[in-house]
Image (cartoon, rainbow, N blue to C red):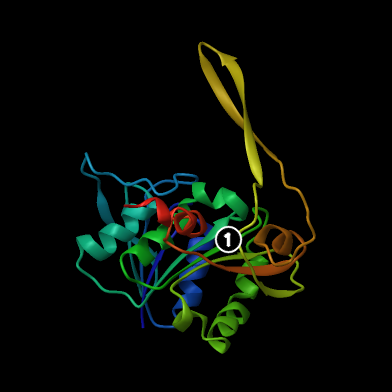
């Protein structure tokens, strides 16, 4: 199996090396990761300017390249720029959870969305910002769960969050808002965004926010489809 690995924390991210090292047991690993941190860059891509792609030393047996652009561009370049095909794209392990509606901002998640858009099965991994130890320790269990339930045969795109303490695994749907920002003036017409939690606990372990924050690994199938099908169907009669 040919595996492409990326992230949004950058080529020097601790979680990237851990994920790449673990993935070697699954197959042939190649890394294309941002040259510098690209957190919260969402699905941005570069269409106007050239960007640097450079081979770098990484881990023994793993070819690695820095891409001076976004996580989505890392995947685009690896697949489209190199004309390569991969069986699986992994993104992470992200320093910080990617849960609820906030995943729209995530470069980690956007990388796997881009992979799925290009026809490749893909999984994003995230964990608490304080430690990667739990995520690393549970990678075998998570991948075994995916295989046991044939989840990659049933769907191509998953977002996985691994808490510090693990009570089990839940298949979840996307929850509501987790963080929001206030903008603090710091002088000279400059403003600093300061984030804070707006999470509301519903104790519903079928959603990723509640499951993850109550110590369950959450596995959320995502979709590329942005159409609200219920509204579309309710309005189908207005077409001539």
**In the picture, residue 121 is in which quadrant?**
bottom left
**Residue placed most toward the observer, 55 or 188:** 188
Q: Is residue 179 left or right of residue 152?
A: right
Name the image quarter holding the N terminus: bottom left
Q: Position of residue 187 (x, y in %)?
A: 56, 12
Q: Position of residue 237 (x, y in %)?
A: 41, 55
Q: Is residue 123 left or right of residue 137?
A: left
- Which residue occupies 64% across, 47% down? 177
Q: Position of residue 46 (x, y in %)?
A: 28, 44
Q: Residue furthest top?
A: 188
- Which residue occupies 45% across, 47% down? 42
**Residue placed most toward the observer, 231 or 181:** 231
Q: Tag count in the figure?
A: 1
- Which residue occupies 19% across, 67% down? 83
Q: Is residue 139 left or right of residue 224?
A: right
38 in relation to 55, above or below: above
Q: Is residue 31 left or right of residue 178?
A: left
**Element under label 1?**
strand
Give the residue pinned by disc 1.
126
Residue 12 appears in the picture as rendered:
no
């Amino acid at each position: 199996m040919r595996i492409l690995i990326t992230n949004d924390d950058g080529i020097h991210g601790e979680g990237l090396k851990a994920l790449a090292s673990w993935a070697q047991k699954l197959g042939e690993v190649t890394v294309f990761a941002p040259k510098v941190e690209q957190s919260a860059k969402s699905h941005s891509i570069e269409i106007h300017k050239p960007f640097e792609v450079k081979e770098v030393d990484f881990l023994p047996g793993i070819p690695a390249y820095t891409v001076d652009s976004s996580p989505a561009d890392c995947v685009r370049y690896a697949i489209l720029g190199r004309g390569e095909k991969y069986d699986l794209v992994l993104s992470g392990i992200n320093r910080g959870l990617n849960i609820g509606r906030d995943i729209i901002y995530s470069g980690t998640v956007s990388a796997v969305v881009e992979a799925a858009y290009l026809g490749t099965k893909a999984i994003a991994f995230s964990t608490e910002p304080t430690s990667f130890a739990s995520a690393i320790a549970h990678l075998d269990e998570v991948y075994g769960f995916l295989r046991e339930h044939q989840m990659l045969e049933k769907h191509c795109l998953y977002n996985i969050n691994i808490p510090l303490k693990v009570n089990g695994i839940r298949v979840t749907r996307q929850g509501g808002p987790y963080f929001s920002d206030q903008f603090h003036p710091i002088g000279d017409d400059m403003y600093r965004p300061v984030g804070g939690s707006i999470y509301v606990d519903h104790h519903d372990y079928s959603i990723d926010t509640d499951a993850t924050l109550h110590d369950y690994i959450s596995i959320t199938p995502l979709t590329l489809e942005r159409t609200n099908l219920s509204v579309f169907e309710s309005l189908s009669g207005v077409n001539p």
